[in-house]
Image (cartoon, rainbow, N blue to C red):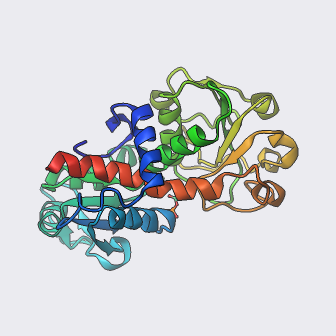
Amino acid sequence: MKNYLSINDIDSLQKLVEEAKKSKKNPKADIKLGTNKTIGLLFFNNSLRTRLSTHKAAINLGMEVIVMNFGNEGWALEYEDGTIMNKGTSEHIKEAAQVVSQYCDIIGIRAFAELTDKEKDEAEVVLNGFKKYASVPIVNMESSVGHPLQGLADAITIEENKTKKRPKVVLSWAPHPKALPHAVANSFVEMMQLQDAEFVITHPIGYELNPEITKGTKIEYNQEKALENADFVSVKNWSNYSDYGKILNQDTNWMITKEKLGAAKFMHCLPVRRNVVVSDDVLDSDQSLVIEQANNRTYAAQIVLKKILKNLE
Ligand code: CP
């Protein structure tokens, strides 16, 4: 693997999940692979799980780790070519990416969508800027459009918990007081498109994700109907895609409750707003997989870093 920018960088999801499960059983088995290698984790936005699990994965592979909260502590970067930089930006991505490449063998980037300009968000200026000008591999730790480390962790979690060959998996929209990006939902959809599963997306009318990502995936606007006989229910809020970044619906009826969940397992990437997105009794029940999903973030990151390190040999 050269870079891990999206779910599309995975050759065989099934094989990668199996290898991740193996690493989970013996996390330090490849501790020599990362000797004398450094990963730089650059955060333009907040994080708990991504920061600690990717750091842990690198430790398990014997790597050195440098972390920088770029959003608060770095120079404001310029991404446009040919700009007269006499305004707010202090350093061009051309220099920044080349400089970081001298210190690191792999660079992880977290840079969320700003949700004000669809075209700009979809251009992925931060992630693609580093990809263009860095001389080392890039790992997407959640960008404007995707969160492929989360998608891979979710694939591991489903594989570990499924009780039938072809489970029914539902991605359900849920209410949220803030406008949130589409990245987690997008990568979940892309990951599910590689799975042998009955996959359904449910959301209020008007909350369609990018059709170039959902392609022919079934959408059921009636949440109750979508949840019938589900084995896994993955829940996420996202803001409107067509009326980009707007909140058009705060319908509390879309919150996931124990009654709606039935016998299904509950999934969420975290952080989650209790009793807004999902009720306490779901999160506190043994049907909730959220803590295991977060645990699997380490093994998702570890298998990705392992593949990249192998490619550097
Ligand atoms: N799920 C996830 O990416 O968590 P963080 O935002 O805390 O990293």
Foreground pick, 34 / 194: 34
Residue 266 vs 270, above or below: the answer is: above
Residue drawn at 48 percent across, 35 percent down? 191
Q: Residue furthest bottom?
A: 73
In percent of width and height, residue 198 lies at 63, 24
Foreground pick, 172 / 155: 155
- Residue 155: tell me if it is visible: yes
Say whether residue 270 is left or right of residue 305: right
Residue 45 vs 297, above or below: the answer is: below
Hey, which quadrant is residue 101 in on the image?
A: bottom left
Say whether residue 106 is left or right of residue 158: left
Say whether residue 307 is left or right of residue 251: left
Q: Quadrant of the N terminus?
A: top left
Say whether residue 234 is left or right of residue 23: right
Residue 238 vs 78, above or below: the answer is: above
Residue drawn at 68 percent across, 56 percent down? 176
Foreground pick, 5 / 56: 56
In percent of width and height, residue 223 lies at 77, 34
In percent of width and height, residue 2 lies at 22, 44
In percent of width and height, residue 192 lies at 53, 32
